[in-house]
Amino acid sequence: MKKLMTGNEAIAYGAYLSGVRVGAAYPGTPSTEIMDNFSRYPGVHAEWSPNEKVAMDVGIGAAYAGTRALVSMKHVGVNVAADSLFYVSYTGLKGGLVLVSADDPGMHSSQNEQDNRKYARFAKLPMLEPSDSEEAKQFVGIALEISEAFDTPVMLRTVTRISHSSSPVELSEEEPPGAPPEPPLYERNPGKFVMVPAYARQRHPVVEEKIKKLAEYAETLAINRIEPGDDTLGIVTAGSVYQYAREVFPQATFLKLGMVYPLPEKLIREFASRVKTVLVIEELDPFFEEQIRLMGIEARGKDIFPMIGEFSPTLIRQCATAAGIIKETPAQAEAAAAVPAPVELPIRPPILCPGCGHRGLFHVLREAGVLVLGDIGCYTLGSAPPLSAMHTCGCMGASIGVAHGVAKAGVKDRVVAVIGDSTFFHSGFHPLINVLYNESNVTVIITDNSVTAMTGHQQHPGTGITLQKKKTAAVDLEKLVRSIGFSQVDVCDPYNIDNLAKVLEEHLSSSQPSVIIAKRPCVLYTREKSTPPTVDPDACVNCGVCLELGCPPLMQAEDHVTIDPILCNGCGLCIQVCSSEAISR
Amino acid sequence: MKKVDILMAGVGGQGTILASNILSEVGLELGYDVKKAEVHGMAQRGGTVESHVRWGEKVYSPVIEQGEVDILLGFEMLESGRWSAYLKKDAVIIINRYRIPPPAVNLGKARYPSEEEIESTLKSGSQNILWINATEIAKELGNPAMVGVVLLGVLSKHLGGAEDVWLGVIKRMVPPKFQELNTKAFLAGRQI
């Protein structure tokens, strides 16, 4: 029996079938649903760790203890976890360990489009890349077998179009292997697991030998396969790009790589000898192409296809046509000739939701004219017009450290850092200690919506609930920041604009470092809604001040503003900013 | 088995994702290979949403190629207008007569295009346009969130498949207390 699953659902299912019993992750698009789905299977422990490095160490611990473990994160999460990834590559493990890296070519929801295939080469470990949901399920099992056979963590790379695309998956009738009846004794082996220099020096040759053996193994691995076709063109590809290329080149010979590192050199040579031209089609970096050229094989690739952005069948066809590899189809010629009527279609950028507490905060920050060093989350949308009140955003947890640096460099502007609650638990704590330790008078605003909102409302250490919906200890943000030594700490409701503005002014005029917790739970999560206000068209002077909140239900009508009651959440910010008292409920 | 490529375009919160899930499940029940790809932007609400659903004997890419869309199902006028280059010459365009102005329009910094303008840009792709007041119909049924299922009702007439199959999938995929309302919404669309 077959069931439609996204790539993420299939990875979770594959992990469950393969007997994975510990899973750890930090939410991040497009990886989030992997751990979310895995957590629903019986007999497993699944958790949202505070950040990806913690998740990686949790997975490593489980694997050291002999259990199969799954760790998942988005591509930039691997940067956070990299320190751990590199040591576990040296130590190896006991139970199988799979790290899923969900990359985001095209940056649908990310700050960069780094190609994480390079991490496999960098950390010297194998990487598999599925091209649909069925493979996603199967490759988790294969990855775990490789992990145990070669004593190495294995990476499984997906991209947005694998993680978030659905295709049929064959359901298994077999039950997954259960937990051992008795917990085993932990096997102590310092020479293998204590990476002091003396032991690490002994492990490095083991790692180099491991990668060589894996390259030999890759030659016979069934998921690296030649699909015979016309011998004029031989295409080397993997993952989602394989599917696009199959559409555009139905006749070509394919080398479809399921293991994308290390590469099977003999197989590639044999493939190259069968075809007239070798064409490497890969998104982002020339990862295969450079290695194939190093083998002394002539290949084309990045001279035809871009290094930037997400691929699609459309893009591959356009590039291949421009390079003269395929001829333009009649439909293409027709489409190119059909010039659409010149109508300007305004863009629709992402915006803060109606009723979002962040809106009140960014209104206050804009009016105060402060320099805002920002962070990653829904509130990053406070940088967009008309709020335009965030001036930097780089990666998770960067805000407070950057604010401290700006303050130390010295600028005329008054400086605040804005960081969300989940992002604070992820990596805001250490830069906050630094503000105290190295003394800057930065005001840190923790904008607390009491959930990890942007990725779809995941729990975190402050919510008092675990991924598997158990009640647990909740870290109290106010107590936490007071306990480490902050004396000026205020908790405010960002729905109350006047009060928040007053508190901000007090903090900015004091000479000490301080923290404001702007607390308002996400309305999409609480599902709270108040009566939408209405605009009195006679009282409205059409000044546009309320529109500067950038709230979707507020719309410009002919000579006044209106409020769409379907979209409106009833937060009442517009009532507060209207100086002509035209808005009421 | 004829290949069918359907593209859905709308705004976050309109129910595009549920509709594309239902459409994919119907394809699988009808014996097709099915793939679906969707992109929902960073915002939980109010951003652009596109969903590709492909039915066929064997489907490779989850993403539809330009010039290959058989049916464009537009949940919102402006979002529908962006896809003319993706349409087959004889594509069916089913478009909900409903506007959600983007921020720049609300601020008076851009103009929302007229119905005629959206129609003219889509006509460079296909002449075959069907305007539906799906949001109005959904409101009359008592819940504007039903717009996606009303549109699926319209779509079902063009795709075939027995009414029972469609209704069976819808019942399976919505919470029990909304089953009756969704059935009504689907049938209302199917009658158009």
Image (tube, coloured by chain):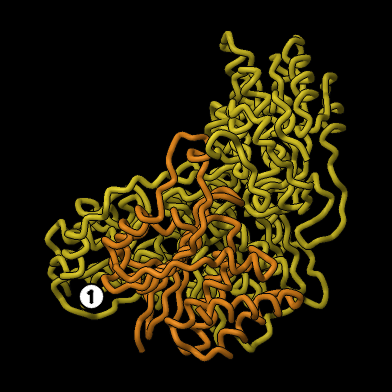
Chain colours: A yellow, B orange
Q: Position of residue A120 (x, y in %)?
A: 45, 54
Residue A443 in the figure: left or right of residue A308: right
Crowding near pointer 1: few (<14 within 10 Å), some, many (20+)? many
Residue placed under numbered mark 1 in the picture: A253
Is residue A144 visible to the viewer in this orientation of the structure? no
Residue A346, quarter of the rendered image: top left
Count of all numbered marks drawn on residues in the image: 1
- Viewer-proximal residue among A457 and A550: A550
Q: Position of residue A23 (x, y in %)?
A: 68, 62
Chain letter for mark 1: A
At 28% from the left edge and 58% from the top edge, which residue is drawn?
A315
Residue A385 in the figure: left or right of residue A221: right
Q: Position of residue A13 (x, y in %)?
A: 62, 74
* Tag 1: amino acid: Thr
Instruction: Describe the element under mark 1 as helix, strand or loop.
Output: strand
At 86% from the left edge and 28% from the top edge, which residue is drawn?
A483
Asked if B25 appears above or below A324 in the picture, the reply is below
The quadrant of the image that shows the N terminus of chain A is bottom right
The quadrant of the image that shows the C terminus of chain A is top right
- Viewer-proximal residue among A344 and A148: A344
At 24% from the left edge and 52% from the top edge, which residue is drawn?
A302
At 45% from the left edge and 48% from the top edge, which residue is drawn?
A107
Q: Position of residue A379 (x, y in %)?
A: 63, 38
Is residue A253 visible to the viewer in this orientation of the structure? yes
Asked if A276 appears above or below B160 in the picture, the reply is above
